[in-house]
Amino acid sequence: MPTGQTRRAALVTGASDGIGAAIAIALAKDGCDVVITDLLRGDLTATAAAIEAGGGRAVPLSLDIRDQASVESGFARAVEAFGGVDVLVNNAGIPMTRPAVDITRTEWEAALAVNLTGTFFMCQQMGRHLIGAGRPGAIVSLASTHGTVGFPNIIAYGVAKAGISHMTRILAIEWAPHGIRVNAIAPGTTETPSRAPMLADPARRETMLKRIPLGRFGNAGEMAAAVRYLVSPEASYITGQILLLDGGLTAY
């Protein structure tokens, strides 16, 4: 943290592993106190230990962004833990792969409930908190290349991620007068534990890599570095943007 800068508090959803864990650990290294959340508090043990090993402070919380009561109570506990929240990172999400002709209403609604609706209501709580306290802040949500260009068999996931991108633009405009910056990152395929089974197939891996100009997948640390920048003072003039981190995939 730069000399003279007061400590900030961050809340990161879906922080048990992968990109969410990397973001939480990176923000802690920047001097943030971090509230980390996931469905099960016990799944956050490794992330909390990594933050504390680096000299940071972590508060693990169970939070289900599909449930409004959980969103409200979880955010209230985050505010109570550190006296306020300055940074919100919406990372929690679920995959949904299904041909459009086969997807059920239950599957569709489940994908949107986590990937879009829950993300909005986390943003809403953050907006209410910051506006009520009269303090600036920063929000970064996880969009996706799947919400930018079309891919088959991911209709619900892709629509939800496209919704996050447009939601980011609208909130950025609406909350700019309050000093609240709202941005998103849109990762391409990233090597994380949840992606490991899909990327283990050599033929599928080769096919996917051929579409990426840089010839490799991303990693969680690269996604975390982008979030660190977007919530930092160095990005104070950036809002309403969706930063694509895809090795050039969407440049075609």
Image (cartoon, rainbow, N blue to C red):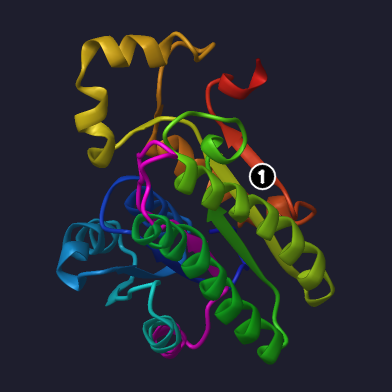
The relative height of residue 211 versus residue 117 in the rendered view (above or below) is above
Q: Quadrant of residue 59?
A: bottom left
Percent coordinates x, y for residue 250 in the rendering: 62, 24
> Where is mark 1, residue-wise?
242
User: Is residue 7 at least partly visible in the picture?
Assistant: no
Q: Which residue is located at x 23 percent, y 58 percent?
A: 53
- Taking the magenta stretch, the answer to whether it contains residue 24 is no
Magenta segment range?
Answer: 75-104
Percent coordinates x, y for residue 31 in the rendering: 46, 63
Neighbor class of circle 1 (other Cα within 10 Å; few <14, some 14-19, many 20+) is many
> Predominant secondary structure in magenta?
loop
Percent coordinates x, y for residue 27 in the rendering: 45, 57
The relative height of residue 50 versus residue 69 in the rendered view (above or below) is above
Q: Which residue is located at x 50 percent, y 61 percent?
A: 89
The relative height of residue 155 versus residue 74 in the rendered view (above or below) is above
Between 151 and 52, the one nearer to me in the picture: 151
